[in-house]
Image: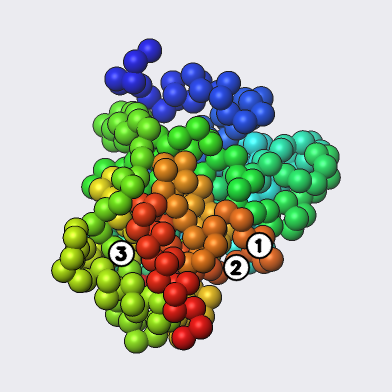
Amino acid sequence: MTNKNKTLGEYIIENQKNFKYSSGELSRLINSIRLAAKVVNHEIRKAGLVDITGAAGDINIQGEAQQKLDVYANDKFKETLINREIVCGIASEEEDDFVIVEGNNKKNENKYVLMMDPLDGSSNIDVNVSVGTIFSIYRRVTPVGTPVTIEDFLQPGRNQVAAGYVAYGTSTMMVFTTGHGVNGFTLNPAIGTFYLSHPNMTFKETGKIYSVSEGYFAHFEEGMKQYLKYCKLEEGDRPYTARYIGSLVADFHRNLIKGGIYIYPKSKTSPKGKLRLLYECNPMAFIAEQAGGKASDGYDRILDIQPTELHQRVPFYVGSKKMVEKAEEFMAKYKDQ
Ligand code: AHM
Ligand code: MG
């Protein structure tokens, strides 16, 4: 079949043989994420009506308690995956600790762990701006048949077997990689089907967009300050264009399509950066590399960091390869200042 009109379901079936260790389990897992994404999407699309039907935390007109959307998204993804018995563990930005999934027969037979930020950028919901779901999948390292342990989650990002995001924007898109490039699927809301709309997505080698909250300029390290000055200089293809939505999925997605760099650096007020290594940076870094881009903490490759805790934060530089390299050059040059 050609790519024209191809659905996500068809894509998954056709590409199953290319998935690492293809046993059908990873295909089922991606299928379940697709399903949860549609359910969450449906709820997000009603968000503007909350003021009419009652604010989060209130009792709505049907007598049901309104849930905050990030809690709702977390519950939906968890419930969908647990019910289908395709993961042995889940870690989420919304949970203090990881969740062990034993399966119905309590045999812990499944091979994959999933980590997620179920609704990233959720503070944007109230102002009608795009949000996203980010997910990351690994094979467990402890033996099948035993409950998962923290070791299964604290794996370097290069061990990921799949990662992706769902962007709830002007349209809803699911973009993911299983280690064979990056493909984007757009939801046709009328029939609830994702279609392959962006096959083989790649970062331009360089671009003109830089995305960083310059409001924190005074708190940045010298290297970052110098890089931002460089972005604004009139020279060659500069000055660049500044674009910052404050929603990682949306900022990353735009840069992937147009060429650019997204940065959440460390600062005096966020000495380790803000974004989480396991739920945000690793999956985005895997997608970036699979799309020919680059991701680092300003000095080293994100995917090589050995995590030490579930909710670990890390500075994040991601996007077009040459732009990330240039930012790293500034960070190295002013390292000790
Ligand atoms: P969240 O996980 O609490 O939603 O925070 C992550 C979000 C990213 O989507 C976004 O890029 C960043 O926080 C924005 O932070 P800031 O408002 O400090 O610029
Ligand atoms: Mg987040």
- Who's the residue at 44% across and 79% down the image? 334
First along the sequence among labels 1 and 3: 3
Q: Amino acid at mark 1?
A: Pro
In the rendered image, the vertical position of residue 250 relative to residue 17, given as above or below:
below
Q: Amino acid at mark 3?
A: Ser
Residue 251 at x, y percent in the picture: 32, 57
Mark drawn on residue 307: 1
- Who's the residue at 39% across and 85% down the image? 219
Q: Which residue is mark 3?
A: 211
In the drawing, does residue 142 fall left or right of residue 258? right
Q: Residue 227 versus residue 64: which sits nearer the camera?
A: 227
What secondary structure is marked by label 2? loop
In the rendered image, the vertical position of residue 110 relative to residue 123, given as above or below:
above
- Who's the residue at 34% across and 20% down the image? 3
Q: Would you call the spot at circle 3 few (<14 residues within 10 Å), some (14-19), or many (20 or more)?
A: many
First along the sequence among labels 2 and 1: 1
- Please give the count of numbered marks on the rendered protein: 3
Quote the CA–CA distance across marks 1 and 3: 26 Å
Q: Which residue is mark 2?
A: 312
Quote the CA–CA distance across marks 2 and 1: 7 Å
